[in-house]
Amino acid sequence: MNRIPPALGHLLPTTLAFFTPQSGGSPNANSIDSLYKITLYVALVIFVLVEGALAYALYRFRARKGAVAAQIRGNTRLEVGWTTGAAVILLGLAVLTFAKLSSIQDPVNSSAENEHLVSDGARLYASAERKLPPSGKSLNITVVGRQFVWQFVYPGNEPDGLGAPYSYEEMVVPTKTTVTLDIVSADVVHSWWVPQLGGKFQAVPGYHNYTWFKIEKPGIFRGQCALICGRGHARMIATVKAVPPAQFEAWLAYQKTLIAEANAAAQVARAKLGSQIGAGQVENP
């Protein structure tokens, strides 16, 4: 019995992967990928049938000496058939797309053991654009696009609204936890895109955009700004690092400690500056 060489066995999946979206990081990205592949397979079947029929017609009815081509002035049954067939295919794809949209747009709940990592809903809200999990709880992170770096602001600010922990370029998140993103811009239009975690979302000055993801296993997912935003656009990378919940809590606590230490040093500097008078206030702050 002949066996297909391993190289040929991987050829079709590898080729299709080149033309399909990346996935595997989050349920919404997987839904986008599966919907895309279904549409691609249908399109490939139609392409093969149409091109096959065209090749057959070119060969079967090629010009021959002495042969007179039949003059056909239309075929009502054939025309109605292909029109109806195309309409049925388009309707089927439309129904499938709308059936899949909820799994792409609507976040799922975090795993039960990670409920302590997400908000109790007091500071979250849902709208036509912003979706929340059925439980109404998620880890909400604000993504700020800046020329030319991504900033990630985490919950946990002080009562005065200041001191929220943040990071640049690398977003750290816990596994098995639903993360909702509030995407904004501080200057020009940017585009948030980590392919394995879902689609692209614009960061527009004065406007909020929203998306979500949930990563099951520890890993690193890479992306970048997907819209030319200036000379430093190529350097505006983004990395999402998923770690176990305990490691995330330790990392977040460390970030809060760094901010508290920086705020304390700033208060000392301000007090020193305020105690000086005259030229010393400017020359020796």
Image (cartoon, helix red, strand yellow):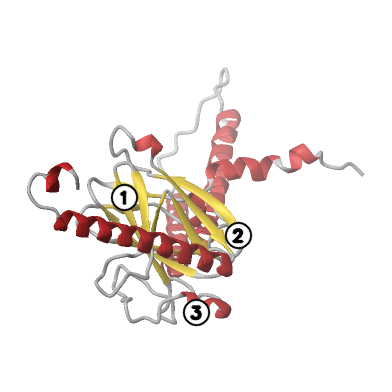
Assign a secondary structure to mark 1.
strand
Q: Nearer the viewer, residue 260 or 174?
A: 260
Element at label 2: loop
Name the residue carrying label 2. Answer: 218
Left/right of residue 240 with respect to residue 228 in the rendered view = right
Tell me the residue at 56%/19% (across/down): 66
Q: Are marks 2 and 1 in contact (CB under 8 Å)?
A: no
Question: How much space separates mark 2 and mark 3, taking CA atoms?
Answer: 19 Å
Say few, some or many: other residues with alpha carbon within 10 Å of mark 2 (under 14 / 14 to 19 / 20 or more).
Answer: some
Q: Give the percent coordinates (x, y) of residue 103.
A: 47, 68
Separation (CA) of disc 1 from disc 3 = 28 Å
Q: Nearer the viewer, mark 1 or mark 3?
A: 3
Residue in the image at 52% along x and 53% along y: 196
- State the residue at coordinates (46%, 65%): 252
Q: Amino acid at mark 3?
A: His
Q: Amino acid at mark 1?
A: Gly
Location of residue 268 with respect to 279 vertically, above or below: below
The residue lying toward the viewer, choosing from 6 and 272, is 272
Mark closer to the chain start, 2 or 3: 3
As displayed, is residue 192 above or below residue 249?
above
In terms of sequence position, does the residue under pointer 1 or pointer 3 come before the other? 3
Quadrant in the picture for residue 133: bottom left
Question: Could one spot residue 94 in this view of the protein?
Answer: no
* Residue 89 in view, yes or no: yes
Q: Residues within 10 Å of mark 3 (few under 14, many from 20)?
A: few
Point out the residue furthest to the top here.
65
Element class at badge 3: helix
Q: Which mark identifies residue 173?
A: none
Residue on which disc 3 sits = 116
Q: Residue tagged by mark 1? A: 145
Identify which amino acid the numbered label 2 is placed on. Answer: Pro
Which residue is depicted at the point 48% across and 70% down? Answer: 178
